[in-house]
Amino acid sequence: MRNLMKNQDDSWGILGLQNCILNIAKYFDEFCEERGIDYCLMGGSALGAIRHKGFIPWDDDLDVFMRPDEFEKFRTAFKKEGDTTSYYLQEWGGNSEHVTFAKLRLNCSYYQESVFDNHDIHKGVFIDIFILHNCPDSMIGHLWQYFWSRYLVLKSLANRNYKRHGRLGNLILKPLKWLPKRAFVDYAIKQIYKSNAKKTKYYCHYLGRAGYSKGLYRSEYFKYSKRVPFENITLRVPGRVEDYLTERWGDYMKIPSKEEIAYFQHSSNWSVSKPFDGFNVENKYSDEVNLIS
Protein backbone atom coordinates (compact mmCIF):
# COMPACT_ATOMS: atom_id res chain seq x y z
CA MET A 1 0.00 0.00 0.00
CA ARG A 2 1.48 3.31 -1.11
CA ASN A 3 1.90 6.26 1.25
CA LEU A 4 -0.31 8.93 -0.32
CA MET A 5 -0.49 11.25 2.68
CA LYS A 6 0.91 14.76 2.53
CA ASN A 7 0.27 15.23 6.24
CA GLN A 8 2.60 13.10 8.42
CA ASP A 9 1.37 14.37 11.79
CA ASP A 10 -0.33 11.43 13.55
CA SER A 11 -1.61 13.38 16.55
CA TRP A 12 -5.04 11.81 16.10
CA GLY A 13 -3.69 8.27 15.75
CA ILE A 14 -5.46 7.59 12.45
CA LEU A 15 -2.83 8.43 9.82
CA GLY A 16 -2.52 4.78 8.78
CA LEU A 17 -6.29 4.48 8.44
CA GLN A 18 -6.50 7.68 6.39
CA ASN A 19 -3.76 6.44 4.07
CA CYS A 20 -5.62 3.15 3.58
CA ILE A 21 -8.86 5.00 2.80
CA LEU A 22 -6.97 7.24 0.38
CA ASN A 23 -5.60 4.20 -1.46
CA ILE A 24 -9.18 2.95 -1.90
CA ALA A 25 -10.21 6.40 -3.14
CA LYS A 26 -7.32 6.47 -5.61
CA TYR A 27 -8.39 3.13 -7.08
CA PHE A 28 -12.02 4.32 -7.25
CA ASP A 29 -11.02 7.62 -8.88
CA GLU A 30 -8.82 5.97 -11.51
CA PHE A 31 -11.45 3.33 -12.26
CA CYS A 32 -14.08 6.04 -12.82
CA GLU A 33 -11.73 8.32 -14.78
CA GLU A 34 -10.82 5.56 -17.26
CA ARG A 35 -14.51 4.95 -17.99
CA GLY A 36 -15.84 8.51 -18.01
CA ILE A 37 -17.86 8.00 -14.80
CA ASP A 38 -18.46 11.14 -12.75
CA TYR A 39 -18.46 11.53 -8.97
CA CYS A 40 -17.52 14.22 -6.45
CA LEU A 41 -16.44 14.38 -2.83
CA MET A 42 -19.21 15.32 -0.44
CA GLY A 43 -19.67 16.45 3.16
CA GLY A 44 -16.58 16.51 5.33
CA SER A 45 -14.45 15.09 2.53
CA ALA A 46 -15.25 18.04 0.26
CA LEU A 47 -14.72 20.36 3.22
CA GLY A 48 -11.33 18.76 3.92
CA ALA A 49 -10.32 19.11 0.29
CA ILE A 50 -10.93 22.88 0.36
CA ARG A 51 -10.01 23.76 3.96
CA HIS A 52 -7.12 21.31 4.52
CA LYS A 53 -6.12 20.21 0.98
CA GLY A 54 -6.82 16.65 2.14
CA PHE A 55 -8.42 14.89 5.08
CA ILE A 56 -9.77 16.91 7.95
CA PRO A 57 -7.04 15.82 10.44
CA TRP A 58 -9.47 14.00 12.77
CA ASP A 59 -11.70 12.53 10.02
CA ASP A 60 -11.71 8.75 9.69
CA ASP A 61 -13.80 8.25 6.55
CA LEU A 62 -14.21 9.51 2.99
CA ASP A 63 -17.55 10.18 1.28
CA VAL A 64 -18.44 10.67 -2.38
CA PHE A 65 -21.61 11.66 -4.21
CA MET A 66 -22.75 9.94 -7.40
CA ARG A 67 -25.86 10.61 -9.43
CA PRO A 68 -28.03 7.48 -9.88
CA ASP A 69 -27.07 6.95 -13.53
CA GLU A 70 -23.37 7.36 -12.74
CA PHE A 71 -23.58 4.86 -9.91
CA GLU A 72 -25.32 2.39 -12.20
CA LYS A 73 -22.46 2.75 -14.71
CA PHE A 74 -19.92 2.25 -11.93
CA ARG A 75 -21.71 -0.79 -10.49
CA THR A 76 -22.01 -2.46 -13.91
CA ALA A 77 -18.37 -1.76 -14.81
CA PHE A 78 -17.02 -2.84 -11.43
CA LYS A 79 -18.84 -6.18 -11.54
CA LYS A 80 -17.35 -6.87 -14.98
CA GLU A 81 -13.89 -5.33 -14.74
CA GLY A 82 -13.21 -4.34 -11.14
CA ASP A 83 -10.45 -5.67 -8.92
CA THR A 84 -12.71 -7.96 -6.90
CA THR A 85 -9.69 -9.70 -5.40
CA SER A 86 -8.82 -6.51 -3.50
CA TYR A 87 -12.19 -4.75 -3.21
CA TYR A 88 -15.82 -5.52 -2.45
CA LEU A 89 -18.81 -3.39 -3.50
CA GLN A 90 -21.40 -3.48 -0.73
CA GLU A 91 -24.84 -2.17 -1.69
CA TRP A 92 -27.33 -1.01 0.91
CA GLY A 93 -31.11 -0.98 0.99
CA GLY A 94 -31.41 -2.18 -2.57
CA ASN A 95 -33.72 -4.19 -4.68
CA SER A 96 -33.03 -5.21 -8.28
CA GLU A 97 -33.13 -1.58 -9.46
CA HIS A 98 -32.19 0.84 -6.70
CA VAL A 99 -29.84 1.27 -3.76
CA THR A 100 -29.77 3.83 -0.97
CA PHE A 101 -25.98 4.00 -0.80
CA ALA A 102 -22.93 1.78 -1.19
CA LYS A 103 -19.50 1.16 0.27
CA LEU A 104 -16.38 0.15 -1.63
CA ARG A 105 -14.54 -1.97 0.94
CA LEU A 106 -10.98 -3.27 1.06
CA ASN A 107 -10.60 -7.01 1.54
CA CYS A 108 -8.20 -8.22 4.26
CA SER A 109 -8.81 -5.15 6.43
CA TYR A 110 -11.07 -4.31 9.36
CA TYR A 111 -13.10 -1.30 10.46
CA GLN A 112 -15.31 -1.73 13.51
CA GLU A 113 -18.74 -0.18 13.68
CA SER A 114 -20.25 -1.52 16.89
CA VAL A 115 -23.78 -1.55 15.50
CA PHE A 116 -22.67 -4.32 13.10
CA ASP A 117 -20.72 -6.46 15.60
CA ASN A 118 -23.34 -9.22 15.52
CA HIS A 119 -24.07 -9.04 11.80
CA ASP A 120 -22.46 -11.28 9.18
CA ILE A 121 -21.45 -8.62 6.66
CA HIS A 122 -18.22 -7.42 5.07
CA LYS A 123 -16.47 -5.14 7.61
CA GLY A 124 -13.40 -3.95 5.74
CA VAL A 125 -12.10 -0.36 5.56
CA PHE A 126 -14.22 1.57 3.05
CA ILE A 127 -15.20 4.70 1.22
CA ASP A 128 -18.90 5.67 1.24
CA ILE A 129 -20.77 6.20 -2.03
CA PHE A 130 -23.93 8.24 -1.49
CA ILE A 131 -26.57 8.71 -4.18
CA LEU A 132 -27.50 12.34 -4.93
CA HIS A 133 -31.13 12.47 -6.03
CA ASN A 134 -33.33 14.95 -7.85
CA CYS A 135 -35.74 16.59 -5.43
CA PRO A 136 -39.12 18.04 -6.52
CA ASP A 137 -39.22 21.82 -6.66
CA SER A 138 -42.26 22.15 -4.37
CA MET A 139 -42.12 22.31 -0.59
CA ILE A 140 -44.55 19.38 -0.37
CA GLY A 141 -42.27 17.38 -2.66
CA HIS A 142 -39.25 18.19 -0.46
CA LEU A 143 -41.06 17.08 2.67
CA TRP A 144 -42.34 13.87 1.05
CA GLN A 145 -38.85 12.87 -0.01
CA TYR A 146 -37.43 13.83 3.38
CA PHE A 147 -40.09 11.80 5.21
CA TRP A 148 -39.37 8.58 3.31
CA SER A 149 -35.63 9.09 3.56
CA ARG A 150 -35.83 9.42 7.34
CA TYR A 151 -38.12 6.40 7.48
CA LEU A 152 -35.42 4.32 5.77
CA VAL A 153 -32.77 5.53 8.21
CA LEU A 154 -34.91 4.83 11.29
CA LYS A 155 -36.13 1.46 9.99
CA SER A 156 -32.54 0.44 9.41
CA LEU A 157 -31.56 1.44 12.95
CA ALA A 158 -34.54 -0.43 14.38
CA ASN A 159 -33.63 -3.57 12.43
CA ARG A 160 -30.16 -3.45 13.96
CA ASN A 161 -31.48 -3.03 17.53
CA TYR A 162 -29.80 0.36 17.71
CA LYS A 163 -30.24 2.28 20.95
CA ARG A 164 -30.54 6.04 20.66
CA HIS A 165 -29.63 8.46 23.39
CA GLY A 166 -32.82 9.76 24.93
CA ARG A 167 -36.26 8.33 25.53
CA LEU A 168 -37.95 9.91 22.49
CA GLY A 169 -35.54 8.34 20.00
CA ASN A 170 -36.04 4.87 21.48
CA LEU A 171 -39.82 5.30 21.54
CA ILE A 172 -39.71 5.99 17.80
CA LEU A 173 -37.48 3.00 17.06
CA LYS A 174 -39.41 0.45 19.13
CA PRO A 175 -42.58 0.20 16.98
CA LEU A 176 -40.47 0.20 13.79
CA LYS A 177 -38.68 -2.86 15.13
CA TRP A 178 -42.01 -4.70 15.33
CA LEU A 179 -42.71 -4.13 11.62
CA PRO A 180 -41.41 -6.71 9.11
CA LYS A 181 -37.81 -6.02 8.13
CA ARG A 182 -38.68 -4.78 4.63
CA ALA A 183 -41.93 -3.03 5.59
CA PHE A 184 -42.43 -0.05 3.23
CA VAL A 185 -38.71 -0.15 2.34
CA ASP A 186 -39.13 -0.72 -1.39
CA TYR A 187 -41.92 1.87 -1.54
CA ALA A 188 -39.73 4.41 0.28
CA ILE A 189 -36.83 3.83 -2.12
CA LYS A 190 -39.16 4.35 -5.11
CA GLN A 191 -40.30 7.68 -3.63
CA ILE A 192 -36.69 8.79 -3.33
CA TYR A 193 -35.88 7.80 -6.91
CA LYS A 194 -39.07 8.89 -8.64
CA SER A 195 -37.96 12.43 -9.62
CA ASN A 196 -34.64 11.44 -11.17
CA ALA A 197 -36.03 11.42 -14.71
CA LYS A 198 -37.17 15.03 -14.30
CA LYS A 199 -35.19 18.25 -14.49
CA THR A 200 -35.36 19.90 -11.08
CA LYS A 201 -33.78 22.91 -9.39
CA TYR A 202 -32.68 20.86 -6.41
CA TYR A 203 -30.74 17.77 -5.49
CA CYS A 204 -31.00 16.21 -2.06
CA HIS A 205 -29.30 13.75 0.23
CA TYR A 206 -31.39 12.94 3.27
CA LEU A 207 -29.90 9.54 4.14
CA GLY A 208 -26.94 10.95 6.06
CA ARG A 209 -26.60 13.20 9.09
CA ALA A 210 -27.72 16.40 7.39
CA GLY A 211 -31.20 17.53 8.38
CA TYR A 212 -33.97 18.82 6.15
CA SER A 213 -32.49 22.20 5.21
CA LYS A 214 -28.84 21.05 5.17
CA GLY A 215 -29.54 18.07 2.90
CA LEU A 216 -31.09 20.10 0.06
CA TYR A 217 -28.84 21.70 -2.57
CA ARG A 218 -29.21 23.64 -5.79
CA SER A 219 -28.57 21.29 -8.70
CA GLU A 220 -26.48 23.95 -10.46
CA TYR A 221 -23.72 23.38 -7.89
CA PHE A 222 -23.19 19.91 -9.38
CA LYS A 223 -23.46 20.55 -13.14
CA TYR A 224 -19.81 19.59 -13.45
CA SER A 225 -17.03 18.36 -11.20
CA LYS A 226 -13.43 19.52 -11.00
CA ARG A 227 -10.15 18.19 -9.65
CA VAL A 228 -8.52 19.64 -6.56
CA PRO A 229 -5.49 18.57 -4.48
CA PHE A 230 -6.25 15.99 -1.81
CA GLU A 231 -3.15 14.98 0.16
CA ASN A 232 -0.67 13.80 -2.51
CA ILE A 233 -3.25 13.02 -5.21
CA THR A 234 -6.19 14.87 -6.76
CA LEU A 235 -9.87 14.01 -6.42
CA ARG A 236 -13.10 15.49 -7.77
CA VAL A 237 -15.33 17.99 -5.97
CA PRO A 238 -18.55 19.75 -7.10
CA GLY A 239 -17.92 22.44 -9.69
CA ARG A 240 -19.29 25.07 -7.32
CA VAL A 241 -17.90 23.47 -4.20
CA GLU A 242 -17.64 26.71 -2.23
CA ASP A 243 -21.38 27.37 -2.70
CA TYR A 244 -22.18 23.79 -1.70
CA LEU A 245 -20.04 24.06 1.45
CA THR A 246 -21.54 27.42 2.41
CA GLU A 247 -25.06 26.00 2.08
CA ARG A 248 -24.06 22.97 4.15
CA TRP A 249 -22.02 24.66 6.93
CA GLY A 250 -22.15 28.43 6.58
CA ASP A 251 -18.66 29.58 7.59
CA TYR A 252 -16.98 26.33 6.54
CA MET A 253 -13.46 27.62 7.24
CA LYS A 254 -14.22 27.77 10.98
CA ILE A 255 -12.68 24.90 13.00
CA PRO A 256 -15.35 23.06 15.06
CA SER A 257 -15.35 22.51 18.81
CA LYS A 258 -13.98 19.36 20.45
CA GLU A 259 -17.54 18.16 21.08
CA GLU A 260 -18.41 18.49 17.40
CA ILE A 261 -15.21 16.69 16.42
CA ALA A 262 -16.07 13.73 18.66
CA TYR A 263 -19.55 13.52 17.09
CA PHE A 264 -18.12 13.04 13.62
CA GLN A 265 -15.61 10.32 14.51
CA HIS A 266 -16.66 6.76 13.80
CA SER A 267 -14.28 4.01 14.95
CA SER A 268 -11.22 3.51 17.13
CA ASN A 269 -10.74 -0.17 16.26
CA TRP A 270 -9.39 -0.87 12.80
CA SER A 271 -6.69 -2.71 10.87
CA VAL A 272 -5.33 -2.08 7.40
CA SER A 273 -3.53 -5.43 7.16
CA LYS A 274 -5.61 -8.04 9.02
CA PRO A 275 -9.08 -9.24 7.93
CA PHE A 276 -12.16 -8.99 10.11
CA ASP A 277 -13.53 -12.10 11.81
CA GLY A 278 -15.66 -13.97 9.30
CA PHE A 279 -13.88 -12.76 6.18
CA ASN A 280 -13.99 -15.26 3.32
CA VAL A 281 -12.39 -15.01 -0.10
CA GLU A 282 -15.74 -15.55 -1.86
CA ASN A 283 -17.24 -12.55 -0.02
CA LYS A 284 -20.45 -14.36 0.85
CA TYR A 285 -22.18 -13.18 4.03
CA SER A 286 -25.59 -14.19 5.31
CA ASP A 287 -26.69 -10.68 6.35
CA GLU A 288 -25.70 -9.00 3.07
CA VAL A 289 -29.02 -10.05 1.51
CA ASN A 290 -31.49 -7.15 1.54
CA LEU A 291 -29.10 -5.05 3.61
CA ILE A 292 -30.89 -1.87 4.65
CA SER A 293 -29.08 1.42 4.82
Image (spheres, grey):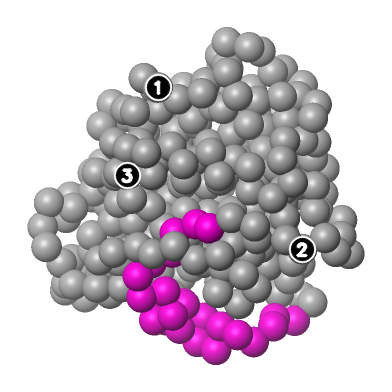
Work out whether mark 3 precedes mark 1 in sequence or the reverse, and give the earlier one.
3
Q: Amino acid at mark 2?
A: Asn
Q: Which residue lies at the image location 62% right of the left edge and 70% below the top edge?
A: 53
Q: Which residue is mark 2?
A: 7
Where does label 3 land, which residue? 37
Residue 261 within the magenta-colored segment of the rendering: no
| Whole-number angstrom distance, CA of label 3 to CA of label 1 | 14 Å
Q: Which residues are magenta?
A: 234-257
Residue corresponding to mark 1: 81
Of label 2 and label 3, which has the lower sequence position? 2
Q: Quadrant of the N terminus?
A: top right
Q: CA distance from mark 2 to mark 3?
A: 29 Å
The residue carrying pointer 3 sits among few (fewer than 14), some (14 to 19) or many (20 or more) residues within 10 Å by Cα, namely some
Q: Position of residue 14 (x, y in %)?
A: 81, 53
Residue 253 lies, in percent from the top left, at 60, 85
Secondary structure of the residue carrying numbered label 1: helix
Residue type, label 1: Glu
